[in-house]
Amino acid sequence: MLTPIAYGLAAILVVFIQLVGLRFLLQPQAAATGYGVPAKLDGDSAYLTIKGLRDITSGVIGAALLLFADADAVAWYMLAVALTPFGDTIIVLRHGGTKAAAFGIHFATAVIVVLSAALLFAA
C-alpha cells in the first residue's frame, strides 16, 4: 500500500517541478510573481530562463530515477533536491517577498519533498 503512494507522490512532484520550469520559460514575469519575488520588467530575463531550465532539469533527473532506479535512489534524490525549495524560502525572505509566499509555497514544498523521501525510504 505504501509503495504506490510513495511513487505517486514522487511522480506528482517531478511533473510539478517540470511545469514550474516550463512556466518560467513561457511566462517568466508571471512565474516570478508566483515565485514570490516579482521580476523587474526591464530586468535581465536570462535569470528567469535559468530558473526555468534548472527546474525542468531537476524534473527530468527525477523522472529518470523513477523510471530506472530503485526507491532508495529516488529517496536520496528527493532529499538532495529539497535543498532547492528550502533555499527558495530564504531567497524570497531576503528579497522582499512575503512570508506567506516563502513559507506557504517554498517551505511547504520542501516539507512535502522531504515527506516524499521518507515514504520512498519506507517503501
Image: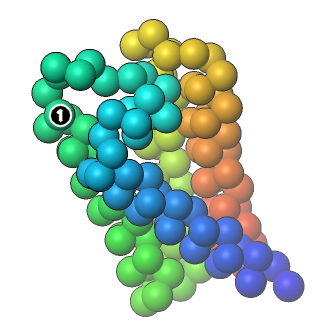
Side of 116 relative to 29 (left or right) = right
Residue nearest the observer in this picture, 67 or 33: 33
**Circle 1 residues within 10 Å: few <14, some 14–19, many ≥20:** some
- Residue drawn where x is 61% and y is 54% of the image: 113
Q: Image height check: is 14 above or below 112?
A: below
Residue nearest the observer in this picture, 29 or 13: 29
Quadrant housing residue 61: bottom left
Side of 4 relative to 91 (left or right) = right
Side of 62 relative to 26 (left or right) = right
Residue corresponding to mark 1: 45
Q: Secondary structure at mark 1?
A: loop
Q: Image height check: is 117 above or below 24?
A: below
Task: Work out whether residue 49 can be spotted.
Answer: yes
Measuring from the top left, give residue 14's x and y in whole percent: 50, 67
Q: Image height check: is 56 above or below 61?
A: above
Measuring from the top left, give residue 101's x and y in whole percent: 59, 26
Task: Work out whether residue 54 can be spotted.
Answer: no
- Residue drawn where x is 17% and y is 34% of the image: 45
How is colour applied across the structure in the image? rainbow
Measuring from the top left, give residue 74's x and y in whole percent: 52, 72
Side of 113 relative to 60 (left or right) = right
Quadrant housing residue 88: top left
Residue nearest the observer in this picture, 107 or 27: 27
- Residue drawn where x is 67% and y is 76% of the image: 8
Extreme residue toward the right, this view: 1
